[in-house]
Image: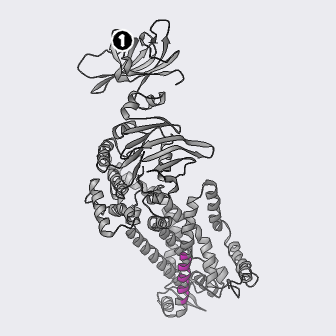
């Protein structure tokens, strides 16, 4: 049975539906990311789990018990906020101790656990600092220690890394993942950063306009996007209009001068979508002209104008000579590297 | 060349602030210095003001218990008014801050109301509510059997405190409100998620953070109440004087300007000491919150 379960959860503000028909089963110890652009309802869903908002419809269960019936102060969830929401008038140790104090943990045990929690996030020796005297990354760690010290049944992270600079964010991602593995806490991360979601999570829930677009592992969402939205949102992608040609036998999928055996069960106009790094320059295939060529260290980025519209191609910088700007090329890819969607998608 | 430019740029701030500075010196510093000097002059019923240096006025204030009573009353009223505005104003600001947009601006206007009404109308309005046996509030309280005889309002310290607290409330509410604006909007949720109950959140998380706002509001209310003139003059009349009305009477009724000047100077000095002192205390105590 699922550890944390959301069953057809919906939230409306007046006439506006912010989250609709959200169903998800989270296993114990799993790391799940809610990924989507701002306004997609991911934070609202997190706040419903936390209890700051009540769902309009649907049930949230934790270990089979209805979570919505429990007061937010009694849910025992650890939350790290985007702004960290540390208590500025308390020291780091007092901040971390607050949750234990509310649980009436004895003083000796409390200080021991606070010290251990701060040491775990790499802040040993910072016990008596006030939050405003700490850097963003350090505040972030205090917030994490404060959420983890109460041994939460679920750890909720609301865009916790978005206020950090790029280098620090990368470091914190690795550290976050290590801490989460060590203590094996079920974790839900809300983020709009696809790299963050992909590098941290076991599974990603891609959301758009209050609805779930896809629930899958990072690799699967990237390679087998369930919708046009998912393929556009996770990394760069090329969408080409194509048709299924049934006049030849067997039927063929045709995009410009490129064609391949048609997949079963599709007909009429379709959209094929291919990641830029899966397209290669070949002797036959889509005819195109290179518009710009950008060198990016370990890879080359080509922007092409093809017979099916603009296309992006990424090639590893493996020492081979690459086509130059203005050169006519043919683009080709393996049929298994593309995903094909019906025209409606 | 460069030194000339430097000199010019060093002079620029002085030149630019000169008009305001001159106005400030002309209408504030010079009269203030003259008032202080005046307090050391002599005065007699028939000889008028004599520009000599004597300590007569200051000795009179220091020895005559009449003046001690005046200043005692002034600061008693100011302290009670400050406490009343803090006790009522801080929760008021908290509630106001949690209201939604339209109600918030409506109630903000109501809170600012006292400042928009003439002091005479406002104070006499209170007098109508409480005044004698026919006052509305007194009648109501008596009909409920809560009090036997009407609460005296006119010519009492109670009346002064109530009327002053009413007009000072906006300063306290706005000051606390400003402190509330600095609060992290998620801070209550953070405390909630850690298991704190609403009362605990207010006591342990909200109160310590808005305390600087309450205290700076208290400084404003205290200094304005201690130097208030119109409200105490209308409610206290000639019977119940405070430092400000006392100085006024010495100047305009007794015509003993030097003594009035001494009273005014003492009030000013005491207020400056209290305000500067408590401000320094607050800044040290709440260094972490102010940072």
Under circle 1, the secondary element is strand
Question: Looking at the image, which residue is at 24% across and 21% down?
Answer: A318
Q: Position of residue A76 (x, y in %)?
A: 42, 57
Can see residue B261? yes
Q: Position of residue A35 (x, y in %)?
A: 44, 39
**Would you name the residue on which mark 1 appears?**
A329
Q: Find the magenta span and give its range.
A: B69-83
Q: Position of residue B246 (x, y in %)?
A: 59, 84
Question: In the image shown, does B8 or A55 lie closer to the viewer?
Answer: A55
The N terminus of chain A - image quarter:
top left
Q: Residue furthest left?
A: A319
Can see residue A255? no
Magenta segment includes A177: no
Q: Is residue A71 left or right of residue A3?
A: right
Q: Is residue A319 left or right of residue A26?
A: left
- Asked if B42 appears above or below A127 in the picture, the reply is below
Q: Chain of mark 1?
A: A
Mark 1 surroundings within 10 Å by alpha-carbon count, few (fewer than 14), some (14 through 19), many (20 or more) = many
Question: Looking at the image, which residue is at 56% across and 64% down?
Answer: B93
Q: How many marks?
A: 1
Q: Residue furthest bottom?
A: B64
Q: Residue furthest right?
A: B134
């Amino acid at each position: 049975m699922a550890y944390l379960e959301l069953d057809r959860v919906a939230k409306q503000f007046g006439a506006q539906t912010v989250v609709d028909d959200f169903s998800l089963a989270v296993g114990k110890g799993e790391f799940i990311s809610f990924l989507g652009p701002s306004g997609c309802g991911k934070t609202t869903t997190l706040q419903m789990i936390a209890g700051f908002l009540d769902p309009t419809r649907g049930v949230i269960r934790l270990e089979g018990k209805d979570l919505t019936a429990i007061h937010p102060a009694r849910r025992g969830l650890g939350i790290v906020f985007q702004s960290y929401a540390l208590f500025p008038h308390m020291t780091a140790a007092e901040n971390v101790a607050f949750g234990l104090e509310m649980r009436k943990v004895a003083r000796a045990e409390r200080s021991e656990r606070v010290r251990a929690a701060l040491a775990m996030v790499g802040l040993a020796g910072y016990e008596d600092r006030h939050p405003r005297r700490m850097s963003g990354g350090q505040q972030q760690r205090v917030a994490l220690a404060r959420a983890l010290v109460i041994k939460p049944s679920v750890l909720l992270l609301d865009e916790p890394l978005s206020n950090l600079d790029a280098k620090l964010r990368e470091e914190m991602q690795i550290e976050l993942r290590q801490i989460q593995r060590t203590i094996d806490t079920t974790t839900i991360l809300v983020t709009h950063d696809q790299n963050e979601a992909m590098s941290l999570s076991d599974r990603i829930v891609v959301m758009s306009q209050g609805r779930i677009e896809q629930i899958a592992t990072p690799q699967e969402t990237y390679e087998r996007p369930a919708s046009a939205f998912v393929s556009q949102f996770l990394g760069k992608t090329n969408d080409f209009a194509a048709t299924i040609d049934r006049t030849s036998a067997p039927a063929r999928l045709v995009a410009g001068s490129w064609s391949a055996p048609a997949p079963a069960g599709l007909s009429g106009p379709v959209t094929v979508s291919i990641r830029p790094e899966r397209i290669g320059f070949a002797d036959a295939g889509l005819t195109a002209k290179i518009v710009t060529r950008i060198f990016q260290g370990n890879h080359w980025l080509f922007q092409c104008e093809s017979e099916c519209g603009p296309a992006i191609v990424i090639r590893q910088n493996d020492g081979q000579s690459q086509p130059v700007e203005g050169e006519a090329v043919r683009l080709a890819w393996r049929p298994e590297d593309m995903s094909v969607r019906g025209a409606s998608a | 060349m460069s030194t000339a430019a430097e000199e010019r740029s060093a002079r620029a701030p002085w030149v630019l602030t000169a008009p305001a500075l001159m106005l400030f010196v002309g209408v504030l510093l010079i009269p203030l210095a003259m008032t202080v000097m005046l307090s050391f002059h002599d005065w007699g019923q028939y000889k008028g003001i004599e520009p000599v240096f004597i300590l007569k006025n200051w000795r009179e204030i220091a020895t005559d218990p009449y003046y001690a009573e005046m200043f005692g009353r002034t600061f008693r009223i100011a302290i009670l008014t400050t406490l009343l505005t803090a006790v009522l104003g801080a929760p008021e600001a908290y509630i106001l801050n949690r209201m939604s947009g339209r109600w918030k601006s409506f109630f903000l206007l109501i809170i600012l109301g006292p400042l928009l009404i003439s002091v005479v109308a406002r104070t006499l309005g209170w007098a109508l509510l409480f005044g004698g046996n026919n006052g509305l509030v007194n009648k109501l309280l008596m009909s409920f059997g809560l009090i036997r005889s009407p609460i005296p309002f006119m010519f009492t310290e109670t009346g002064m405190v109530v009327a002053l607290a009413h007009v000072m409330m906006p300063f306290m509410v706005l000051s606390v409100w400003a402190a509330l604006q600095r609060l992290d909007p998620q801070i209550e949720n953070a405390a909630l998620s850690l298991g704190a109950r609403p009362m605990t959140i207010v006591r342990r998380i909200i109160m310590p953070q808005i305390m600087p706002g309450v205290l700076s509001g208290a400084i404003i209310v205290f200094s304005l109440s201690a130097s208030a003139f119109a409200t105490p003059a209308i409610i206290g009349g000639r019977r119940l004087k405070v430092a400000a009305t006392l100085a006024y009477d010495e100047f305009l009724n007794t015509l003993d300007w030097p003594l009035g000047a001494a009273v005014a100077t003492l009030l000013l000095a005491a207020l400056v000491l209290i305000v500067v002192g408590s401000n320094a205390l607050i800044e040290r105590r709440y260094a972490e919150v102010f940072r």
